[in-house]
Every structure is written in C-alpha cells, then in structure tokens.
Image (cartoon, rainbow, N blue to C red):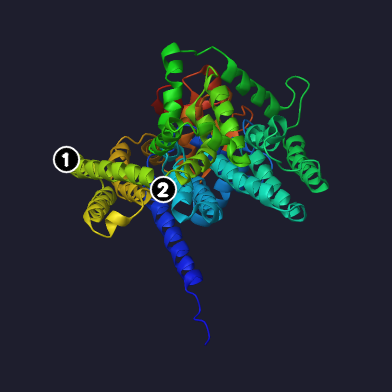
Amino acid sequence: MAAKPTTAPRDDRKRTFAYSLFFILLWACLYLPFLNQPELEKEEPRRVIPALEMLEHGDWLRPTIAGEPYLNKPPGLNWLIAGSFQLFGMSEWAARIPSSVSLLVASLAAWFYFRRELGNHLAAFFPAFLLVSATILSKARLAEIDATLTAANTLLLVLWISLMKAPPQGRWWRWVLAYSIVTLALFLKGPVILLFWTPLLAVPYILGIGKGVKLFTISHVVCICAAAAVFGFWAVAANPSTPSNGSPLFSNGLQEIAERFGFSNFNWPAYLLKPFRFFGGLCPWVFPLVFALLVMNKEKRFRQWIRAQAPRHTLAVITIGLSVGLIILPNFLPRYLLPIIPWVAYLTAHAFKDLSEKQKATYRTFTVRTILVVTVAALPASLIASILLWDILADTFRIGVIVGACLLTATAVALFSRRGRSLPFLNYALLFFMGAAPIGYALVNGHKATEAVYAPLANEIRSKIGVNDSDAILVKCTDAFVEDGISHFALLFYLYPTRLSKVDPESSETGLIIGRGRDQEVSKGYQPERVLAELNDLTVWQISE
C-alpha cells in the first residue's frame, strides 16, 4: 500500500507565508503612515539636497550642495534617495522610504535564515528588534544613514553565521556577498562598518572561541582587496586633496572623531544618563532579554550558556565590549549603537530558546496581561487626545486615528478569545504596535503639520516673486549659509525646482540670495531689490541685474 504524501512541507510553506505577510503588514503600519510628515528635519536636508543635485547635474560621484563638494559623508544614501526620487517623484515620503525598506529587507532575511535554527516564533525577535525598537522607530522614519547601516550589519550577521557553518568549498560566494555588503556600507558611512565587521572575524581567533572562520584564504583576501579598491577609487576620485587641507573627506572624518572624544560640550548629568538612554532605545525588547538572563543567572548557568556556542560567545563579548566602549565616549549618542541591535536580537532569541516551557509560560502570562492593561488604557487615552486635537487634524490624520483604534480594539478582542490566548507572546506585542502606531503618528504628526515652517516660507517666497511651482528659481547661497546653515537647508528642498550655486559677484543673473543674517557680504556686487523673508538668522533677498 502506497504511503500517503506528507503535508509537513505544505504546512511549513503556509506558516512561512503567514509570518512573512504579518511582518510586512507590521512594517506597513509602522513606517508608511504619514511618512511625509513632518517637514525635513535634523540631518535630513544634508542627505536630500545632494541627491537632488545629482539628478540635476548628473554627477553621481561627488555629492554637492550649491555646486560645492559636500564630503562629510560618502554618497551611498544620496544614491538611494536619488533613485527613490526617480521612482516616486520628489517628496518627503520618497526621501525617507529607502531607510525603512532597508530594515524590512534585512529583518525578513534574518527571520528567514534563523527560523530553521530557532523556529518561526523565536526568529521573530529579529523583525521585532529591527522594526519596533524605540531608537529604530525614531531614526528609520527619517532620511538618515543609521537605519540603512543597521540593515547592512544585520545581513552581515547572517552571512557571518553562514560562514561559520559552511564547508570550506562553499564559502567563496559567501565572502563575495559579505564584502559586497561591506562595500555598500562603506559608501553609507565610511569605515564605521569595520568597527562592527572586523571584531566578528577577529575575536574568535584572539580569544580562542571555537574554530572561527578561516581568514587567510584566497577568496577572503581577494574580496578584501576588491572592497578596498572600489571604495579607495571613489575616495581618490571624488576627494581631491589640496596642499592646505588635504582630502576633505578624511579631514572631516578626523574632525568628527575628535568631537566625539572631546569634552567641549560635556555635561555630567547627561553623561550619567547615557546607559539608560541606550537600554531605553532597545525597549520594549530589552525586557525579555533581561528576564531570560536573570533566570539563567539565578540557576547559575549563565556562563555555561554563553560559552556553549561559539557565535553566541563571540557576540556576547563584542556586544558588551562595544557598548561599554562607545557609551563612555564624552559625546556618545544612542544611535551609534544601532548596528548592534541584530546581535542583541540573536542573543535574546537564543536565551529564550534555552528557557524551560514553564519559564516561557510565566513570561507569556506577564506579557499578555501587560499588553491587555496598556491596550485598555490606550483606547480611552487616544480618544481623549483625538477629541482635543480633532479640530486641527487634517482628514488623513483623522482616518489614521480611526484605523489605529480599530486595530487596538481587535488586539483587545484577540486577547480575550480562546484561539487568541494560544498565540505566542511576541505576536501579541507586535499586534499592539500595529494598532498603536497609526494613532500615535496621526496625533503627533498631525500636530506637527500645523507647525510647518519651511514649506509655507517657500510658498510665500514664490508668491512674492510671481513664480509658479513648476518654474525653476536661481538660488545663490553664501559661504556662511553652506558651511553653517544646516538648520535651514530644508528651505532649498521646498523651493525646488531650483538651480543652486554659490554667490558670484560677477554674475548678472536674477534670482535669490540665501544667507545667514543681513551680512554685508551677502549683497556684495548686487543691488538687492528687497528682503523676501527672514527667519531667525536666515535672510532671503531678491536680486536683479
């Protein structure tokens, strides 16, 4: 009698599809709503303006602002933003989407790889940490480098584990993939990625942890040389050195390092709070990690658990070493440690894997009750906030509040249902954030939309000079504005389409001059018709021939 075909592979494919769809929906709820709000802020204009000039001038090698080389960072993120502008058009949404998409890709790749080792549920710690951690949420919805660098380090973690497990004859293509990602990361933030990649390779040899990965192989050496050659070629071609200041990229990098180690803005109270800011940035997932570690420490098997597996031992040593080393920096910021988040996710998942079923059930009960209390409290709190802000919220923000409230209600119902009570605790937590995120973004960004500064200012300037939104304006920036006007660069984005250049007294073209205050040098060689706008230390003139 013929054996009946097994349904296990089919069931596994269904679970894989269900989990993948769930993570994509989680990402969509967290990162797509109101991504065009608020205005460009913080460092975003410094990433967006060079991308616009790349599209305008066709120079993809050297990032510029107002035609002048802007070499504080390599052009990797500028390339991603410029490509996004070509696909989706110019908007805040298009500028910010590359950061969040990179995290989605990395979290799915990590979950798909580690689910065979950890199971579907525990491997979900990777999407949880990478999509829902507090610091990640504050950075991945911006056109900034930190999220993409974290995504790159996540993929490197996957490849490093794969290299440790692979037979020698199957490692060459893994080295190629790993150093392709290293090269991309070099173009994002320069050699910073080596601070995270090099210890993964070196620490097992230095401390004698396991067998490690064979480093002195032809394939590895060739990949190192290729990555160094590609980035080195760009560094030489795009950063011409001068006898006075050398290469701008490297001089700017050394200056930034000196600032991080310096004590110019040192503040003792803020310095003492830095460890709490770091652990707070890992919330809410720092709690399951602490719970698991406390349980193992109580049972006096923490050291045994750490040393039982070479990757786990290596990651624990590097995570602790890098965290302590960076936290003690005088000017440390929590975002510096974002790339270690996938390492913490790996340790957390393995810690929970080694807990007993009774211990897992204890934490699950605690999580479900906490989420239930928070959900029940969040619904009336969001209702009260919505009523207070309803008049100033646009229709799209009101819809966000309603959708989020429905999702939160569904989470509360699921907690009480018989089938819902059997769900893993991690799914409950992620469901809660799916509902809470649209409400939070709608209320916060809806309020920020009423405080917009540069978009209304750009519209006011265009109306004063009688120029349509589709007509390009010649905008000339003073040296002081390009060097120190970072906080006002967003105006250049909202004035687009523009032709940006530095102030040239010999030019007779009509247009605008943007400068820092009413400096006499701004109008040198020109006859300003009138001051069009002033904002703090920003002044915009109209010039004529």
Q: Nearer the viewer, residue 294 or 127?
A: 294
Q: Nearer the viewer, residue 536 or 152?
A: 152
Residue 211, x across and y down, in percent:
71, 41
* Residue occupied by mark 2: 31
Tell me the quadrant of the picture where the C terminus can be found: top right
- Sequence-first disc among 1 and 2: 2
Position of 202 with respect to 413 (left or right) is: right
Residue placed at 31% from the left, 34% from the top?
451
Q: Which residue is mark 1?
A: 384
The answer to whether 438 is drawn above or below residue 241 in the figure is below
**Disc 2: CA contacts within 10 A as few (<14), some (14-19) or many (>=20):** many
Question: Horizontal and vertical percent for residue 113?
Answer: 56, 54
Amino acid type for the residue under numbered disc 2: Tyr
Of residues 254 and 161, the one nearer the viewer is: 161
Question: In the rendered view, would you say 202 is above or below 27?
Answer: above
The residue at 45%/69% (across/down) is 11
